[in-house]
Image: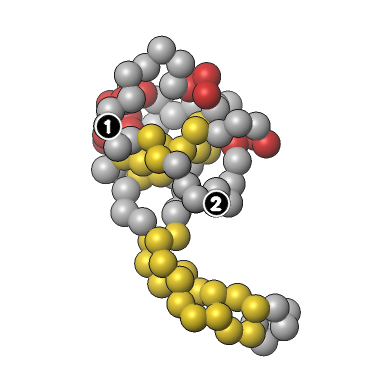
């Protein structure tokens, strides 16, 4: 992945799409919900500098309702591509 720059990118990141019912975890005693489906595609968390000056195709930038990850603890841009080849073409 010569196009992948870990100093401004994190991924691919699995993104949950749906969850099962709440249940009590036997080990921790906490209420949890299991992931029942994952969002399709190749997901990357990137620093804003990674997309600076780039035209972002329609539907590539996504806005998670409650993101569970941030890139390097800073502002994060969330991108979803059909596959790794599409991501490589965008960043290549």
Residue 42 visible to an observer of this rendering: yes
What x and y, as percent, mark residue 18? 41, 67
Tell which of 72 and 62 is nearer to you.
62
Q: Quadrant of the N terminus?
A: top left
Near mark 2 (Cα within 10 A), the count class, few <14, some 14-19 or many ≥20, is few
What x and y, as percent, mark residue 2? 40, 26
Residue 44 visible to an observer of this rendering: no
Q: Which mark is residue 66?
A: 2
Q: Earlier in the sequence, mark 1 or mark 2?
A: 1
What x and y, as percent, mark residue 58? 27, 32
Q: Which residue is mark 1?
A: 58
Q: Quadrant of the C terminus?
A: top left
Give the left or right position of residue 34, taking residue 88 as reference: right
User: Which residue shows up at 39% across the image and 25% down it?
Assistant: 3
User: Which residue shows up at 46% across the image and 77% down it?
Assistant: 20
* The image quarter in which residue 8 lies: top right
């Amino acid at each position: 992945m010569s196009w992948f720059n870990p100093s401004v990118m994190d991924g691919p990141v699995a993104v949950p799409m749906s969850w099962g019912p709440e249940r009590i975890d036997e080990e921790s005693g906490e209420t949890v919900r299991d992931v029942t489906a994952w969002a399709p595609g190749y997901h990357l968390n990137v620093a804003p500098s990674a997309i600076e000056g780039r035209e972002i195709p329609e539907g590539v930038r996504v806005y998670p309702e409650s993101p569970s990850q941030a890139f390097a603890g800073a502002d994060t841009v969330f991108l979803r591509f059909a596959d790794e080849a599409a991501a490589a073409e965008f960043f290549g």
